Image: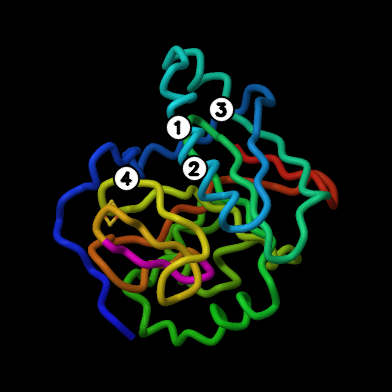
Amino acid sequence: MSDTTHPITAAPGAKRIDPHEVGTGVTRRDFLVIATGAFAAVGVAGTLWPFIDQMNPDAAALALASTEVDVSSIEPGQSIIAVWQGKPVAVRYRTEEEMKAAQQVPLDELKDPNARNANLDSNAPATDENRTRPGKEEWLVMVQVCTHLGCVPLGQQGDFGGWFCPCHGSQYDTAGRIRRGPAPENMAIPPYTFTNDTTLRIG
Ligand code: FES
């Protein structure tokens, strides 16, 4: 596989978000942006952030402390991007192939062995199962913010079929675990629950 690591300079105008700002407050439902397929998701990422940036920061951050998502129209291989606490959260209905690929990765090959899952013990290992919730392993719900310097990676790209960060070339697998490049950690799994079969509450 080719090494696509880029020099440590951010792309002009690249959006950066503090990857550690992952809170747990619950207030009210807000909006979400639905996209189908990788290309649509990329397009949303490109148009969404200017809109968010125009919002009053206090009002926007508080309004998005909790986000409820109807996942009933998402099919295997499709993603949406929800907004939670001002951050993009990928909600991906993974295919069998994507899950198998992530499950087959030996843990000692992972750069970050920690699940980074706010729903689990902080020492939980980064198995594919631990990146999801029990009984809902097909759903990957993940803060789509690169753990290097906070750019927003592109979905379903790169050598591992997961996410590729265009800022400095970090590559994540189909469980959102860092596999190559300068990012130090797996992308964060936020607190979330399925309140019924088709409703996901983030936060
Ligand atoms: Fe540097 Fe993503 S922000 S690789």
Amino acid type at image mark 4 = Gly
Q: Is residue 175 above or below residue 10?
A: below
Neighbor class of circle 4 (other Cα within 10 Å; few <14, some 14-19, many 20+) is: some
Question: x, y (%) of residue 54?
Answer: 43, 17
The reply to whether the magenta stretch includes residue 25 is no
Q: Secondary structure at mark 4?
A: loop
Amino acid type at image mark 2 = Ala
Nearer-N-terminus badge (2/4): 2
Nearer-N-terminus badge (2/3): 2
At x 76%, y 54%, the residue is 74
Residue that numbered label 3 is attached to:
65
At x 65%, y 28%, the residue is 31
Residue that numbered label 4 is attached to:
150
72 on left or right of 58: right
The reply to whether the magenta stretch includes residue 171 is yes
Neighbor class of circle 2 (other Cα within 10 Å; few <14, some 14-19, many 20+) is: many
Q: Quadrant of the N terminus?
A: bottom left
Q: Nearer the viewer, mark 2 or mark 3?
A: 2
Amino acid type at image mark 3 = Ala
Quadrant of ligand 1 in image: bottom left
The answer to the question of whether label 2 and label 1 lie on touching residues, with beta carbons closer than 8 A, is yes
Q: Which residues fall within the magenta stretch?
A: 169-175
Residue that numbered label 2 is attached to:
45
How far separated are the C-alphas under marks 2 and 1? 7 Å
How far separated are the C-alphas under marks 2 and 4? 14 Å
Q: Secondary structure at mark 2?
A: helix
